[in-house]
Amino acid sequence: MKRYLLLLLTVTLGLSVRAQDRCDIIPAPKAYEEMPGAFRLRSAAVEADPAFAETAADLSARLAAVTGLKTAKPAAIRLVRVEGLPEEAYRLEVTQQQVTIEATDPAGAFYGVQSFLQLLPAQVYGDKRAKGVRWTAPCCRVEDRPHFPYRGMHLDVGRYFMPKETVMRFIDLMAMHKQNMFHWHLTEDQGWRIEIKKYPRLTEVGAWRPFTADYKDENPDGTPHGGFYTQDDVREIVEYARRRFVTVIPEIELPGHASAAIAAYPQLSCNPDAPHAVATSWGVKTDVFCPNAFTFQFLEDVFTELFDLFPSPYYHIGGDECPKDAWMESDYCKDLMKVLGITDFHELQTFFVRRMDSFLRAHGKTVIGWDEILDGSAVESTVVMSYRGHAPAAKAIQRGMKTILVPNRWTYLDYYQMDPALEPKAQSLYLPIDKVYNYFPAVDSLRTLSDEYIIGYECCVWGEYAQTPERVEYLAFPRAVAAAEVAWCDRGEKDWDSFYRRMRKEFGRLDAKGVRYNRALHDEMFNGGTAYREIPGQLQWKEQ
Ligand code: ACM
C-alpha cells in the first residue's frame, strides 16, 4: 500500500513538473525535451566547424583525460555552425548515436558544450582519469539562449591578494555556468595589485602592508600581506578567460580608494608632504586622488598600459565612496573650482570622472562606474553599476543610461549565507541562497524601460572577509551558481524547487572540481535543515 501511494505521488508530481525541470542543467535552459535512451561515449573525438575548433579541442582533451578514451574517428560529437541563431544561443541534440551542438557564434557552441558536460556524470569535471564510471548522457533536445548579455561576477583582490591560479579557477567556474563578465577589482586602499611598468613603486610599495586590522583599526594581526599580478600573469589570465568566453574587465578605482597608489606616489595626493601609507584597516579612507596634472597623466599612463593587456570593451573606473576632506582643505582644488566655475565638491568629482571617461571613450572603451557617478552630470554613455539598491538604477534608466544591477542586499556574497552562529565572520548582512536565486534584475516601476536599459547583473565577492582562496570559494559557492541562473533565465522562468533538485548533481560537479564551497549549507539543504532559507523580514544580523 505504501509503495502504491509512493508511485501515485511520483506520477502526480511528475506530471506537474515542466519539461525543462527534469534535466540537470544549470542554468536552466529555455527548452528541454527528454527522449528515450542514452548516448554512450566511446571516443573522445570531437568534429567541429573551424570557427569552433578551440572549444572542440578543449572538450576532446577533457573527455580523453577523464575517461581514458582515445580520439578514434569517426567522431560522435559534432559542433556544427548554422546561420541565424541569436548571439550566444545553441541547440543541443543527444541521440543514442551522436551528440550535435549547433550555434552561429563560437560562444553559443561553447555554451552547448557546457550543457552537454552537465548531462554526463559529474566526474567529467575532475582533473584525472575517473575509473568505473559509465560515460552516458540522457537523450534529449535542448534549445537555449541567455536573457542578459552581461552575466558577471566580481572579485576583490585589493583587500587580500589572490594567487593567479585562484583567479583562473574562479573564471573557469564562471564559464561552466555560462557567466561571461569577470569584473576584476584590482586596486584598493589596502593594495594595488597590477604591475605598471612606468610606475614600479605601485607594486614595490603599494602592493604591501605590514599587518591587517579591523574596521576600527583594532586587533592588528601582526602579519605582513601583499602580492600583485605581473603583466605576464595578466596576459595569461586574460587568455585563459578568452578561451572560456569570459571578458576580463579591469577596475581601477578613482578618485577614491587610492591610499595604496598615493603611498607609492604621494604627488597623487593634494597634500604630498603629509604621511601616506597603504591602508592597514577596512572602511572608507580619505586619501583620494587629487585632480592635478600629475594624477591625470598618471591615470592616462596606467590605462594606456592596460589597453595592451585587456581587450575588454568595458573598463570600470570605480567612482564610489570618495570623501572630499582632502579636496576641501586644498587651495589647489579651490582654485581649480573657480577656474571651472563650480562651487560644489561633488561637481569636482564629476569633472574628474568625466575627464577619465572622455579619455577612455577616445580609446574606444565603454566606461562602467559605481552608482555615485550619477551624483553629478554623468556622461550618458557610461554604464551605471547600481549597488545601493534600485533607486540609482531608476535614475540611470530615466537618464537613458545603460545599467547593471548589483543591488547589495541581493548580490553581495560577503554577507552571511546562514545563521552567523554556523559560519566564520562575514559582513553583517544576511543573504541566503534562495534570496539570491529568487531575485530578478529589474526596476519594477520602470518595467518596459528596464528591459531596454538593464544589460545585466552580477554578484560581488568583496575581500575584507575573503582572506584566502578557500574563503573566496566558500563565500561564492554555492550562491554563485544561483546567480548564474538569475542572469541566464527570463522573467518567470526560474523555479526554486527545480533549482534545489538540480543542485544535488551540481554539488557533485563542485566536488569533482574540488571547490571548497560552504559544506554546512549543503548539509542544511539536503538533510532537512532550513538555515539556508530566507527568514521573512530578517534583513540584518546583529553584529556579534
Ligand atoms: C561598493 O560597495 N562600495 C561598491
Image (cartoon, rainbow, N blue to C red):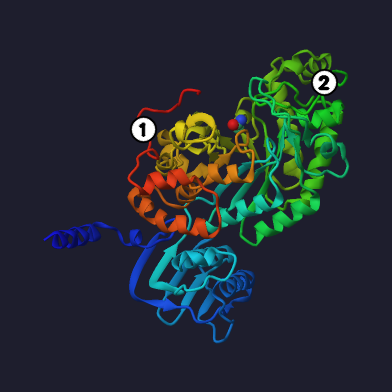
Q: Quadrant of ligand 1?
A: top right
Counting from the top left corner in percent of width and height, residue 221 is at 69, 29
Q: Secondary structure at mark 2?
A: loop
Residue 213, visible in the rendered structure: yes
Vertical relation: 51 (above or below) 387: below
Q: Earlier in the sequence, mark 1 or mark 2?
A: 2
- Circle 2 is placed at which residue position? 270
Nearer-the-camera pick, 471 or 341: 471
Residue occupied by mark 1: 535
Q: Position of residue 365 (x, y in %)?
A: 70, 46
Taking the image as shown, residue 425 lies to the left or right of residue 538, namely right
- Dot 1, how many residues are within 10 Å of its Cα: few (below 14), some (14-19), or many (20+)? few
Dividing the picture into quarters, in which one does residue 50 lie? bottom right
Say left or right for 266 vs 487.
right
In the image: residue 119, left or right of residue 154: left
In this rendering, is residue 350 above or below 24?
A: above
Residue drawn at (39%, 72%), measured in percent from left and top? 138
Query: In this orientation, which residue lies closer to the viewer: 9 or 396?
Result: 9
